[in-house]
Amino acid sequence: MIGRMSSAQMHQGSLNVIFDAQARLQKTQESLATGKKVNAAADDPVASAQITAVRAELSRLEVMQKNVNVAYDELAMTEASLSSAEDLISRAREIAVQGANSVLGPEDRAILATEIESIRDQLFKLANTQSSMGDYIFAGHAIDQPAFVDVEGNFEFQGDNGQRSLNIAAGVTINVRQVGTDVFGEGETGIFAVLQNLAGGLRNDDDEIIGRSISQIDNSQQLMLEGIADLGSRMGLVEDQQLLNESFNIQLKENLSGLEDIDYAKAISEMNLQMVALQAAQQTYSQTRDLNLFNYL
Amino acid sequence: MASIYDVGSSALTSMQRAIATTGHNIANVNTEGYSRQEVRFGTRNPERVGLVEIGTGVEVTSIRRAHDRFLVSDVQMRSSSSAYYQLHAQTAQNIDGLLADPSTGIAPAIDKFFAAMEAVAANPNSAPERRVMLSEAQMLAQRFNYVDERLSDYAQELNTRMSNMTDDINALASEIAQLNQTIATFGGQSGDMPNDLLDKRDQAITDLSRIIKVQTTTQDDGSINVSIGRGQRLVIGHNAEQLRIDFPAAQDGPARLYLSVPSGAESEVTAQLTGGELGGALEAGTQMINNARRDIGLLAAGIASTFNAQHASGDDLNGDPGEAFFSPLDITVTGTRTNSGQSNVTATITDVGQLTGEGYSIRYEGDGIRLTNLSTGATELVPEGVLELEGLRLELPPASPEINGDTFFIEPTLGAAGQLSVSLTDISKIAAANRDGAVGDNRNMLSLIALRDANVLKSGAHSYSSLYGSTLSGVAVETRSALSNAETEMALLQSAEGRLEGLRGVNLDEEATNLIRYQQAYQAAAQVISVANDIFDTLLMAARR
């Protein structure tokens, strides 16, 4: 209504202007103090629902990065064991080639046989490598018992074909284990039986057995190298995933920042404007409150 | 012949009244609902002297209040809608704050539970990881319990407020009826209006509109009839009806409202009441709280059931099949207190994955068995016997006169979040392995982890995370729109109040001007009397000579 205003209205109107200015200033101050523009869900319900979703995604990604590290360490440990094993197999092949030389006498061959037996024992130890948690890492799922056992000179696998898969990203899993028989072989063609035979051949001066052992060792070495290559490629996948996760992490943090962080320059200039507005409202009130005809009666 | 004295004193009396009215206005400058009063003057009946008529002075013909019934009813209407949205926004903010708060929300607890499961998957036979997983599961259950308890508290608080609102409605209705009676004794004649009582009645009706939407009709004798909701009479003349509220099922359960009628009986008006705080509480507030409870209850029931099923398909560290990880949740059927108790509706969940997260009521009516979807309001008559709903089987006893009027509430998920608990206590009984898997087998744990993103709920439409996300964003969107509605309605109310206040409020400057005007008139009239006195004295002196 133009032209008429009640006294209570004028009073309340000036007060309302001051209250509004104070409320706006307080909001900006809170934002500046916390650095966040969404300080309570009510500030922006929809943004805060999105913030919750992004935070959930971030905390999940953190778990995935932890799994990436676990996966990489597991694979690296397995790879280290298998590299040592491959070195030993190479050495065994050298000895076999040396032993095949007919110039050697029985005593020399006996020494070589002892060395082969020592290599076999070292390989046996490697095949029963335990993780820091005490897992027998080549035993498949049967991690609580050695992967291979010595049954009266026969080295038998007592694990299973189980894999250990870990989630390293949404929908991406990686097997971090290697089943013992896939790299050490099994039965007559397994590296342990082959070396056992070779030692026997050396002790008995059996050229035929020694000769056959060389090609069997070649097969075992091939198996081992394939296993190592497979591990290498899985480590590569894990590394790639780590980079992907990191860049996803950065992207999510940017989203989160866009949703909840304030623009300081903007907020500070807003605060200055709001302070001016509040001051103006207060001055207006103090200057007009005494304007009243009764003062002149 | 009217004496000059008479003329002068009529002016003195009238000006005194005018000054008194101005004083009354000044005194009520801060009185809520007060309308400034204005004095109307009129000439007194002239006196015929010979051929001419001579004026006899002034009189106060009426004291009117500045009033516009359209502005008043606009304020009343806006009060109703503003209070409605205010309550809706308040409730929505409470719920949103509870669900979105990182420290109380369920989302972070789900994150932690699944992170703990990842750790078990990485070391399936290691005790510390299993222990952490179990304690995170308990934390998750407690978080569900907490959120449901808070929501139930909100519902109870709202019910208490509704009881208070009902009391206020009854008190205001009596006040209006009483004022009607008093005002009617003035006979509704113009010029003789009980202005202050009219103001009081307007204010009472405005206060009432804040609680419930009203319609008013003015009668010939000046009394105002008030009806609420969809034409339910609350005040007729000097009679006020009584509104009664009842919570027949539970303290945090649905409300029923009854209005007495002149015959002395009462009739249910729950579905008819709209607008105002009470309407907001009945429609928006309660509905929103209950839907939130149903949604998180569906998530709790869904997790308990699907997690348990997957857990059972695996083997624990002892090589035994997985036992129940979470305690299985029961479905409750609540009958109202007034039920006959002659027969009962039974309900069983047939498939949690098919549940919609809606609640139902069954009411035995004269014309059959009425099924109402409490979430959507959809209602239909259904046959007796077995009734299959989404993921739910009801068994309905046949209708009979004995159980006529019986009502049952079937809430498959409302409150389920409050019941969620972890029943597994032995960490070796966490079934991380597939059936017959060795101790290093983590495949079942991976399957359990995969449940988080598997669309196993709401008929394949939602996973654990997406259901919570959609509940949260649904609440957020509703909160935002409630807040913006509340803001808009508040602005509309303020502008209507501004218009009304501008018309009827007291302006001290104006009153000061009037005061001077009437004072001057009074002084002038006193002069008239003084002159009359002089004339009389002159006459006496002349006669003495």
Image: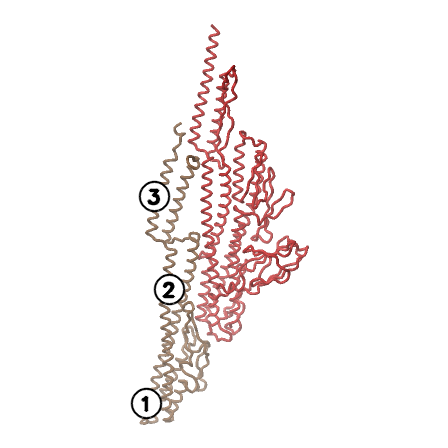
Chain colours: A brown, B red
Give the residue number, with chain letter if any, for mark 2.
Answer: A248
Chain containing mark 1: A
Give the residue number, with chain letter if any, for mark 1.
Answer: A98
Looking at the rendered structure, the number of numbered marks drawn on it comes to 3
As measured in the structure, the alpha-carbon distance from the residue carrying label 1 to the one carrying label 3 is 95 Å
Q: Secondary structure at mark 2?
A: helix
Chain containing mark 2: A
Q: Position of residue A291 (x, y in %)?
A: 38, 33
- Kindly indicate whether the residue at mark 3 contacts the one at mark 1 (C-beta within 8 angstroms): no
As measured in the structure, the alpha-carbon distance from the residue carrying label 2 to the one carrying label 3 is 43 Å
Give the residue number, with chain letter if any, for mark 3.
Answer: A276
**Residue B103 sits above or below residue B317 on the image:** above
Q: Secondary structure at mark 1?
A: helix
Looking at the rendered structure, whether the residues under marks 2 and 1 are on a common chain is answered as yes
Instruction: Choose the circle earlier in sequence order: 2 or 1.
Output: 1
Look at the image and tell me whether residue A258 can be seen: yes
